[in-house]
Amino acid sequence: DTGVSQDPRHKITKRGQNVTFRCDPISEHNRLYWYRQTLGQGPEFLTYFQNEAQLEKSRLLSDRFSAERPKGSFSTLEIQRTEQGDSAMYLCASSYPERGSSYNEQFFGPGTRLTVL
Amino acid sequence: AQSVSQHNHHVILSEAASLELGCNYSYGGTVNLFWYVQYPGQHLQLLLKYFSGDPLVKGIKGFEAEFIKSKFSFNLRKPSVQWSDTAEYFCAVLTGTASKLTFGTGTRLQVTL
């Protein structure tokens, strides 16, 4: 399968613990996005990388959240001191800009479902 | 900030019925609009997109959507639904230089036999 992969698929943790998720984009896709989806809502943008540079962060991304994309390949999203409100599905998407177009179709991974007890 | 509204949260249809899911967006300028679908247990997938040109766009699996600028709408339609269309459908608009997607809250479609 050459699509976007995410690991783990499910994570249950206790409040106050740190968690880290990984996203492997489609090979050669230079853009990588993180979204968060809570029950009954659509995905909400968290942050975006172009290659290894983190170019935009949402106000939703508090100081407890950090994302990295070393070497411009896979990305990690870490949540420190988790809270029950962090329980959600965390989605990763990747894209490659089409020549001459500002548009780039985003391909989504299966997501990591986080449950904070 | 741009926003997207989907007013139908849960729709139940019988097979062969016609489908129309509503989507309204807030931005008054040039918009790029999308419909995504999420089948049970699967990833979000692109159904169709509108960038410019013909306001009636056709997507995969017999779906189509019509962009009506005066109504700020991009409704999804299918003349005859199948049981396999049971899924959650999200309308989205492309925003900003990062090309990030702003999604609606989604519509859960249940098709009964």
Image (spheres, coloured by chain):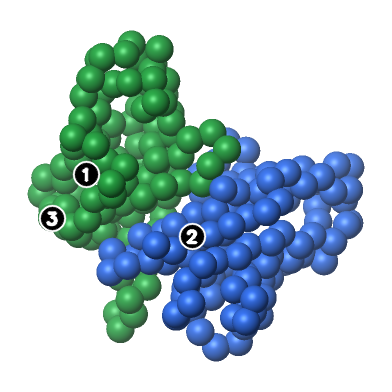
Chain colours: A green, B blue
Give the residue drawn at x 22%, y 44%.
Answer: A74
- Residue A22: in sight, yes or no? yes
Q: Check disc 2 and report its element: helix, strand or loop.
A: loop
Where residue B18 appears, x then y in whole percent?
Answer: 84, 61
> Residue tagged by mark 1?
A74
Residue A19 against residue B43 in the figure, above or below: above
Tell me the number on the disc at residue B3. Answer: 2
Where residue A22 appears, x then y in whole percent?
Answer: 27, 35
Give the residue drawn at x 73%, y 44%.
Answer: B10
Would you call the spot at circle 2 few (<14 residues within 10 Å), some (14-19), or many (20 or more)?
A: some
> First in sequence: mark 1 or mark 3?
3
Give the residue drawn at x 36%, y 50%.
Answer: A45
Q: Check disc 1 and report its element: helix, strand or loop.
A: loop
Where residue B52 appears, x then y in whole percent?
Answer: 51, 84
Residue B40 against residue A52 in the figure, above or below: above
Residue type at mark 3 is: Ala
Displayed quadrant of residue B20:
bottom right
Residue type at mark 2 is: Ser
Q: Are marks 1 and 2 on the same chain?
A: no
Q: What separation in Å lies between label 2 and label 3 (alpha carbons)?
A: 27 Å
Where residue B84 appears, x then y in whole percent?
Answer: 74, 47
> Residue tagged by mark 3?
A53
Q: Quadrant of the C terminus of chain A?
A: top left
Q: What separation in Å lies between label 1 and label 3 (alpha carbons)?
A: 12 Å
